[in-house]
Image (spheres, rainbow, N blue to C red):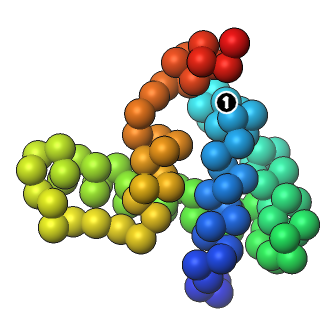
Amino acid sequence: GRHWTVNEVRALIRIWSDKNIQQQLEGAARNKRIFEQVAARLQKFGIDRDWKQCRTKYKNLKHEYKSVKSAQDSGNTSKSMKFFNELDAILGHCTIEQASKSDD
């Protein structure tokens, strides 16, 4: 498929950072419906991606984030990625339980 542009990835991450989307993703093994919502929201930004592309990008970002994070945890600071800080804000610091507690 086409390469994702920086703006497309930013938009995907912005949608992903929505607490509602995060909670749905946490609890779902079958998440086609969620990624259909994500794709629909990207359309509003004028970004034409189908749910499969969104899910693949999400998985790849998450995988890359985890490998950078574990490298950093073991003291290897040379490993990095473009959207690490944005993803760290979503994935790095808390579980969904903690996130929903802080919403009260």
x and y, in percent, of residue 102 in the image: 60, 18
* Residue 4 visible in the snapshot: no
Q: Is residue 80 above or below residue 2?
A: above
> Dot 1: within a 10 Å radius of its alpha carbon, few (fewer than 14), some, or many (20 or more) residues?
some
x and y, in percent, of residue 41 in the image: 85, 59
x and y, in percent, of residue 47 in the image: 80, 76
| Image point (11%, 57%), residue name | 76
| Image point (67%, 30%), residue name | 23
Amino acid on which disc 1 is placed: Gln
Quadrant where the C terminus lies? top right
Q: Left or right? Give the position of 104 relative to 58.
A: right
| Image point (17%, 44%), residue name | 73
| Image point (28%, 57%), residue name | 68
Q: Is residue 34 above or below residue 15?
A: above
Check the image and name the residue furthest to the bottom. 2
Q: Which residue is mark 1?
A: 23
Residue 97, picture quadrant? top right
Quadrant where the N terminus lies? bottom right
Q: Left or right? Give the position of 58 relative to 72.
A: right
Identify which residue, 21 or 99, lies in the foreground: 99
